[in-house]
Amino acid sequence: MSLLDSVLPVEPTNKEKMDQPVETLFDKTASNLVGKPINRVEGSLKVSGQAHYSAEIDVDSKVYGVLVSSTIAKGKVEKIDSDSIAHIPGIIKVVTDLKHFLRNSAQGGDTEAPAQGVSEIFYHGQPIAVVVAETFEAATEGAKALKVTYKDETDQAALDFTKELPNAHEVNEKKGSDKNAKHGDPEQGLADSAVTLDSVYHTPSQSNSPMEPHVTLAHWEDDKLVLYTSNQMIASCKQQVMDALDLKKDQVELISYYVGGGFGSKLGIAPESIAAAIASKEVGRPVLITMTRPQVMEATVRRSNTRQRIAIGCNEEGIINTFIHDTTTSNLPGEAFFEPTALSTHFLYRGENRRVSYQMVDMNHVLSGSMRAPGEAVGMIAVECAMDELANKLEMDPIELRRRNEPEEDPSKEIPFSTRQLVACMEKGAEAFGWDEHNPKPASRLEGDWWIGTGMSGTSRGNTLQPSEARAILQVDDSKELGVKAIIETDMTDIGTGSYTVFTQVAADLLGLPIDHIEMKLGDSDLPPASGSGGSFGAASAGSGIYLACEQLRAMLAKKVGLHADTIRIDNGQIKKSGEHEPSKVEVAIDTGKEKVTELVDEKLANKVSGLMDKAVGLMDIASEKTGIPLPESASNLKTATEQYDFSDAQSYALADVIAEYDEQEISAKGQIKPGKNGKNLRQASFGANFAEVAVHKVTGEIRVKRMTGVYAAGRILNHKLATSQCYGGMIFGIGSALMEEVIHDKRDGRLCNHDLAEYHVPVNADVPQLEVILLEEDDPYTNPMHIKGIGETSISGSAAAIANAIYNAVGVRVYDFPITLDKLLAEMPE
C-alpha cells in the first residue's frame, strides 16, 4: 500500500459546498424523469402489507413492554410496587431505571440525550417504568394495575399559561432556531405612523399525532444494540441513544425503513426507545414497546401555545414603516426550545423599524418542540390576519397592501433574495380563485342560511440545507432487462412524504436507467448519514448527496470510455457522446502554461517540463480518485481510454458491458453536500399564497370551508404528484389550525383532557373541500445542485390565516383566540 493509499479514503467522493450558484444536470439528462408525477415506488408494498413498520418487525423470542405513566403533574416517585402485579399471568418483569429512563423526548437534530431521570415528575403522563410481559395484553393490564406511590406536589405546578405570563423569562437564543432582533426605533415608529394596528393573537398547544405511534423494538446482539424504531432523523437519533446509554458508535444501530408520519414528533428519540433498550438488556430478550395514543399525546411532544403581539405602522398609502412581532411561548422547566413564530416576519414585508422578540413561560406540561412548520405555522396566523386587518383599516385590497410592501431585499439582514415570487403567487392565485369577485365589505353575502366570505394570505417558509451523504453503486445484474442496476444508500428516512420515490427519480435520471433498475436503501444508521426528514430540508439535503454520488459515477464512467464529464450521456442503459467539451478556466490555464513553456525554452527542456507537468497532473488524478475532489477535465482524462470506445460515428455502448470491466463488476462513489456562503449571503425561502371561501351558518355559527386554492413557488419540483399531495396536506393542516386543533390541559391537575383522536379534533374527509394546488415554475441555482426547495411546510404557513380572514369577511367577526369555534362567533354574529 502506498503512502497515498494509507492516508486517503479509497471510495471516490464528490463534495459540494454551496458557496456559489451551480448548474444542474437535470436540464441535460435523457429521460427527464425528475418532475414527472410517477406513482410511489413503494406503494404496492404498503397497500399489500409488505412494507414492514417498526412494530411489525418479527424477531425470535420477542416480548412486549408497556410504559407506566405518572398520574401527577409535579412531585417525586417514592415507591414502585412490582409485587402488586406479580399475580397477573404472563408478566415477566417491571423494569425501572430511575436514572437512565428518558424524562421526555429529544429535540430534532440534538446529538446529546434529552433529559434523563424520572424519579422527579415534571408533567402528568411522564413515563416512569415499563411492564414487560409475554403478551401485549398482559403488559397492558400490568401497566394499568401497577401501584406507584408519589410525593404529590401538583399544587406547586405551573398549569395555567395566562397566570404564568408575569413569570415569563428570556429565551436561550443560542439553542433556538430564531433570535431576537431590533432595527430602528419600533415603538416610536409605531407612535409616529399615520395608520396603526396593534393586536394580540393566541394560538393553543397542538399535538403532532402521527398515524403510526412512537414505537421501538430493541434487541441486543452481544454488546450491540439494534433498535427498529420510528424516527425521522436517524444519524442524530443514534447519537442521542449512544449518549443516553454510554455506548460507542459501533454498538448502536437504528433502523427505520418506513415511518408512518411524524410531523416533527419523531425528530428525536422518545421515552420508549431507551426504556425498550434497558428492558431488553434486563430480560435478555427483544422487547417491543408501542406507545398508546394517549401516551403519544401526553409524553412525546406538542407544539407550544403562543401569545403573539403584532403591531404594524404605515402611512395612508399603506407603506409599512414599522413591524413588531413579540411572542411568548411555553416549555418544561430547563428546556431551551421555543416556538420560532417570527422566522418569516424578518423578511416577509418591508419596514425600516422592526422588532422580533421572544419570551418563554415554564409550564408543567409535556415537552414542546417541533411540529410541522415550527414557527411559521402559527406565527403566520398572527402576521397574515394582522395584514388583513390593516388592509380593512386602509380600505385597500389585501393583495395590493402586500404588493406595496414588497421589499427589494431582506429588510432585516440587508441581503438579496435568491428568488422571491410572493407577488407572482398572489396574482396567479387571485386569477385561479376568482378574487376579482371578492367583496371587501364583511357580512355582505348571504346565501340561504349561510354567510359566505372569502379571504387570502401570503405564505413563506425559509429554505435551508443540511450536511448529507450518500453512496451510489452501479453493478451488473442479469435479472434486470438492461443487465445493470443502481443501488443508492443513505440513512435518510421516508415518513410518508415520498423519499423512496423522488430519490429513485433523481438516480434514474442521472444514471440513465429505468425506475425499476434502481434499488433505494434508506433508514439504517449503518448507511451514510443524511439530514433526515424534517425542516423541509430532507429532499434537498439527502437528495443532493444522492445527486453528487451519481454525478461522480458519471464522471468515472466518462473517464473510463474516454469522454469528458460534460459530454457523456446515459440513455436507457446506453453510454453515448453528447455535444462538445467546453474547457474550464483551470484547463485553459494548464494548456496555456504548457504553451508558454514551449515558447520560452528549447524543445528538449520543454518536453522535460511538459512531462513533469503530466506526472504532476497524474498524481493529482490519483488523489482525485481517492478523495473525490474533482480535477479539471483535461487532467482527469490524460489517460486515454482504450480504442474499443469510439464515439466518432454516434456509437453507443451498453452500460452493463462497461461496468462488467470493473473489478467485482461494479463501481461505487459517494456524494457529500454541505451548506455554504449561499445560505448566509442570500435569503432563501419558498413563497406562496392561500385563498379560501367559507360559509358560516347564520343561526348556529357552524363554519364550513367551501374551497381553497394554494399557489406555491419552491424551486424545481421533483415529483408533481407528490408535491401536490404535500400541499394538500399542508392546506388541510391549515383547516385544523384555524378551526379545531387544540390540546386542552386541565388547569387543576395538568391532565391532558383530550388525549386521543376522538377528542383531539383534526380534519376528516367531511371537513375538507375541493383543494386546488398550483405549483409555479422556479429555478434557484443557489439552493443546491438540484435547485429544489422545501414545499410541504410552505403550504401550511398562512393557510389557517386565509380561512380566518374569510370568516371575518363572511360575518365581520375578528377572532384573536384560535381555533375559531362557533362559540367565539355567536355573540357578535350579524342579524
Image (cartoon, helix red, strand yellow):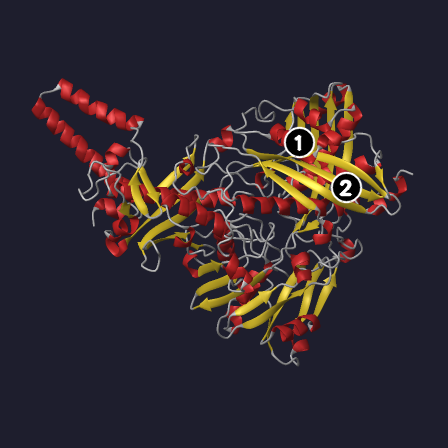
Which is nearer the eye, 351 or 425? 425
Vertical arrangement, residue 532 with respect to residue 316, above or below:
below
Q: Is residue 580 visible?
A: yes
- The residue where tag 1 is placed is 431
Q: Is residue 286 above or below residue 773?
A: below
> Viewed as shown, does residue 432 lie left or right of 599?
right
Q: In the figure, residue 615 lies in which quadrant?
A: top left
Relative vertical location of residue 477 with respect to residue 600 in this rendering, above or below = below
Residue 174: image location, x then y, percent: 57, 39
User: Which one is closest to the eye, mark 1 or mark 2?
Assistant: 1
Give residue 533's position: percent from left, percent from top: 53, 48
Image position of 75 (left or right of 625): right
Image position, residue 178 (x, y; %): 60, 37
- Residue at the (47%, 63%) spot, across then down: 226
Q: Which residue is mark 2?
A: 694
Labelled disc at residue 370: none
Disc 1/disc 2 C-alpha distance (Å): 18 Å
Question: Which is more toward the observer, 398 or 223?
Answer: 398
Amino acid found under the numbered disc labelled 1: Glu
Neighbour class for label 2 at 10 Å: few (<14), some, many (≥20)?
many
Q: Earlier in the sequence, mark 1 or mark 2?
A: 1
